[in-house]
Amino acid sequence: MTDVSGNNSREKTTQWLEDVLQTYYTYLEKEKRPPEQTGAVDVVKISVIDFDIGPGFSGDGRLSTLSDLLSLKVFYKINDGEEEKTENLIVKIPPNDKSDREMAQMAQVDKREIHFYTEAAIDLQKWIKSRNADIKLSIPKCYFAKYHAQPLQDDGDNLSDAESVLVLQDLRPLGFTMRDFNSGLTLDEAKAALKQIAIVHGTSWAFQESTGEPLDDKWDFAYRPRKAASAYKMMIEQGFPTLAEFLDRQKPEGPELLTKLKALHPRAADLLCELLVPPAPPAPSCLTHMDFWCNNLLFRKRTPPDGSETESNKNGSSELESDDDNGETECQILDWQMMAISRPTHDVALLLFTSLTPETRHLHMDSLLQYYWNVFQETAQKLGVEIPFDFHCIKEEYKKSQLLALLLVVGSIDLALDGSSTEARLMDALRDMARDELI
């Protein structure tokens, strides 16, 4: 499907890229027009001069069985102009492996992510604009998306033949990189990630409150609780034996923790359903990522205007109390394939459970949770929506979300046991949950 080495394939890919960029630029022209202006928009002509193609995230640690990724650097001109432009793109298509492809199609991961970019994100961005709010969602720019409910009968040899395609901005040429999962996020990176997900949460919650339309009705493509619980339960059944073997070797406390988890195991399906269903008001429900860990995040260090390195950059730390406008780390959120309407604290718990070292989590968990809440409040305030719950509600919801994070980690246990550092991270989190009587 991705072979573009032959001349015919290269010609077809060139035509496809021209269609993609033409669709994108014509849409931008339409969006620029004042609301009162009607009629057809002139189609923007795109002439692709050349393109380079390569693997999506080779060597960056991004391993996914839910999609195949390609990177494209496209050189082109607009409307026969003289100026040559460049776009760096990431193309997501269904996995080439047959079993992975079937799994992705059953879970409808491509459908959810495509509809996130073409519906949910656009709805939120337009509503933000209508409220004159200074808010930006930190997600990659979407150039093109195509979804077919049924796979094609005959696999093609070109990008244009894929049954589902998502074309996004490649942020790496802009300096964004992934962080190493085994090392864990720094405090500054955790803060940057929580800021951006709090903005998504706060915006989608305020949107729902303002319009009065439940998000799970408006965005019916979001992962439904029962369907999600069923899929997660299958993953837990596959992962639990591996976790049990690991804990049985961690003397003396491992077997005791295993006993607690075995008591929890038969209730996993019911717990998943209970935790995934949006909570009753006034507790918040909103658009959630549901796969919010460091491998689905990209970071970039800001450079001061004079180009010098700040003290915080040198020391690898930052104060939570600092003015966030002066923060040094930016974060972009990727991979919205598992998006759901649920508790916002699910994303917070998953990030803190999976992607922080024990030291960072112990020292800063309370402050990070408070920081997340501050950004959530600030976002709602900018949008002019009053919040009917308080930080105590968020803390209570977070306790429940820690249990969901544990269940999701069991379903992806091979990642949690990837090395000595991640094993220590898991053991530390389990000790804390046992101490707090969450398991």
Image (spheres, helix red, strand yellow):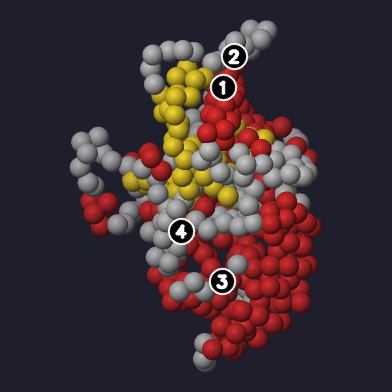
Q: Neighbour class for label 2 at 10 Å: few (<14), some, many (≥20)?
A: some
Name the amino acid type tagged 2.
Val
Q: How many marks?
A: 4
What secondary structure is marked by label 4?
A: loop
The answer for how far apart the CA atoms under marks 3 and 2 are is: 49 Å
Q: Considering only order in the chain, which callout, 2 or 3, is on the residue closer to the N terminus?
A: 2
Q: On screen, 339 above or below 147?
A: below
Which of the two marks, 1 or 3, is nearer to us in this view?
1
Q: Residue at x 52, y 52 (%)?
A: 296
Residue denoted by label 4: 61
**Is residue 327 shown left or right of residue 24?**
left
> Quadrant location of the C terminus?
bottom right
Residue denoted by label 1: 22
Q: Considering only order in the chain, which callout, 1 or 4, is on the residue closer to the N terminus?
A: 1
Quarter of the image where one finds residue 330: top left
Residue denoted by label 3: 414
- Please indicate, yes or no, whether residue 367 appears anywhere in the rendered image: no
Residue denoted by label 2: 43
